[in-house]
Amino acid sequence: MGARWRYMFNEVGLGLRRNLLMTLATVVTVSVSMVLLGIGGLVWIQVGDARDYFYAQVEVSIWLEDGISQSQLTSLNQALVDSPVVDATGVIYESQDEAYEKALQLWEGDPAMQEMIAPEDLPASFRVKLTDPEQFDVIYSQFTGYPGVEEVADQRDILGRFFSVMRFVLGATVIIAGLALLAAAVLIFNTIQMTAFARRQQTGIMKLVGATNWYIRLPFILEGIVAAVLGALVAGAVLVALVAQLRRAVRDMAFIPFIGVEEAITIIPVLVLGGVLLASISSFLALRRFLAV
């Protein structure tokens, strides 16, 4: 058994050296496709993390009518605190004067804008955090038309545009990665086909002396797997370096949750497994179609 395995691995090494340029081309193609696929995976993780973070910061704004009475204000506050979808500790009332002070701070560098606003221009409001930001419709239906309420609004529309862009980037990355993976599969297919054709006499002799089909095919499949795994490892190293560089670039933007090197490392086993599957399927199909063994 040991001699048979030594022979097999010798054949794998010999095949890789004989087709060095094709092997290098396969490694590069797999690397590019796996980098794109890994970027897609990292973007997916980033979108999920950013969504969770930003949605946790979402507040519902309930704008109040100018003539709201104290009894209406008290009733509304109690109704918000009692609502099952509202975080009771996240109900904050902001008067017109407080809204005016906040506006002055916001436009601190623009005196002209500060002169244009007055306390009576800014309505009082409740800022409300929900236990689940997706439950905005419950709050909207419950408090729209409530005595003293002028308008109920939240920030999900702004976030929705942001996540639409992120989803578009993710979709485009996945499509490009898919095309690159297809190119890598075709290259592995052609490499194995050429290798098998060059060694057709040797495989014919092995068949005559009783070698099984799988014993003949396995060295070719392993050649494709080795090239694909090398490409996946190179892609993993590129992704780790890329994420590390991006982390340094955004370290001053602490308010944005950004993926780290740990997430990039967790992607590597997925890339290696994807490379093994890609090479195995491509090699098997190439041998099944072009070798009569």
Image: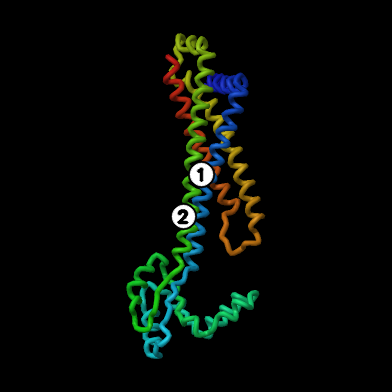
Neighbours of disc 2 within 10 Å: few (<14), some (14-19), many (20+): few
Front in this rendered view, residue 82 or 1: 82
- Which SS class for mark 1? helix
Q: Which residue is mark 1?
A: 173
Front in this rendered view, residue 131 or 201: 131
Residue 214 found in image quarter: top left
Front in this rendered view, residue 177 or 152: 152
Looking at the image, the residue that sits furthest to the bottom is: 70
Q: Residue at x 45, y 16 (%)?
A: 291
Residue 223 found in image quarter: top right
- Which SS class for mark 2? helix
Mark 2: which amino acid? Ser
In the rendered structure, which disc, 2 or 1, sits on the residue that comes first in sequence? 2
Q: Residue at x 49, y 48 (%)?
A: 170
Residue 8 found in image quarter: top right
Report whether 103 appears left or right of 55.
Answer: right
Give the x, y percent position of residue 261: 60, 51
Is 70 rendered above or below residue 156?
Answer: below
Give the x, y percent position of residue 65: 41, 83
Is 32 rendered above or below residue 240?
Answer: above
Dividing the image into 4 quarters, which one contains the C terminus?
A: top left
Q: Which mark is residue 184?
A: none
Front in this rendered view, residue 240 or 4: 240
Mark 1: which amino acid? Thr
Give the x, y percent position of residue 87: 43, 74
Give the x, y percent position of residue 219: 52, 22
Q: Residue at x 42, y 77 (%)?
A: 62
Neighbours of disc 1 within 10 Å: few (<14), some (14-19), many (20+): some
Q: Which mark is residue 164?
A: 2
